[in-house]
Amino acid sequence: MKYFLVGYMACGKTRRGKIMAEELGVRFIDLDVYITKREHRTVFQIFSEEGEHGFRKLETRYLQEICGLYKDFVLSTGGGTPCFNGNMAYMNSQGQTLFLNTDLEIIIERLIRGKHKRPVVSRLNDAELRVFVRRHWKERLPFYQQAKEVVTG
């Protein structure tokens, strides 16, 4: 079975995905790590060199590549993965999608602590980050809500 974890940045997809994969006895894949290995560049570098549009094209290509290569896995997607190129419908057609619906204040605090690792928010001060995340999360929520299952916490 293919499991796709979706949700906003810093909601816990990678941490929960590793635990879930171990419990199920299947492979864990972090989509951003996979892209980094295949491209020999960091996500930050890809954003800098190709912009968000270029990154999203690569993201879709590698999402489909993973689905073609592996039968059973838990995949931690990027926060924007479900929102572009029909990826949410594609993931729903391929397996089980789970939306990790983490409290927004927890997400904001995690992003403030680790924003240097996130190209989308790395240049924002804390106040700007709070405003951005609240707006951005609302834009992405309709995509996350298309998941087959919602996991709160």
Image (cartoon, helix red, strand yellow):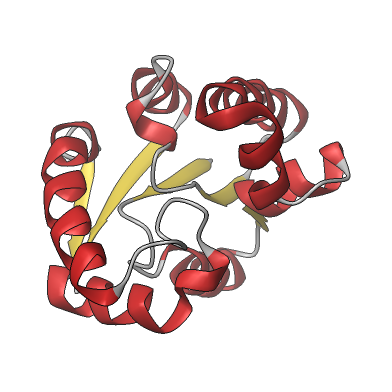
Residue placed at 39% from the left, 22% from the top?
84
Q: Position of residue 52 (x, y in %)?
A: 52, 31
Q: Position of residue 76 (x, y in %)?
A: 52, 53
Looking at this view, is 51 or 18 the one in front? 51
Question: Relative to residue 52, is residue 116 depicted above or below?
Answer: below
Looking at this view, is 103 or 94 the one in front? 103
- Residue 97 in the figure: left or right of residue 15: left
Residue placed at 77% from the left, 29% from the top?
69
Looking at this view, is 131 or 138 the one in front? 131
Question: Relative to residue 86, is residue 38 depicted above or below?
Answer: below
Work out whether residue 55 can be spotted.
Answer: no
Question: Relative to residue 8, is residue 107 depicted above or below?
Answer: below
Q: Quadrant of residue 58?
A: top right
Question: Relative to residue 112, is residue 90 depicted above or below?
Answer: above
**Which image quarter is the C terminus in?**
bottom left
Q: Position of residue 104 (x, y in %)?
A: 15, 68
- Residue 66 in the figure: left or right of residue 100: right
Q: Position of residue 112 (x, y in %)?
A: 34, 78
- Residue 47 in the figure: left or right of residue 42: left
Work out whether residue 65 can be spotted.
Answer: yes
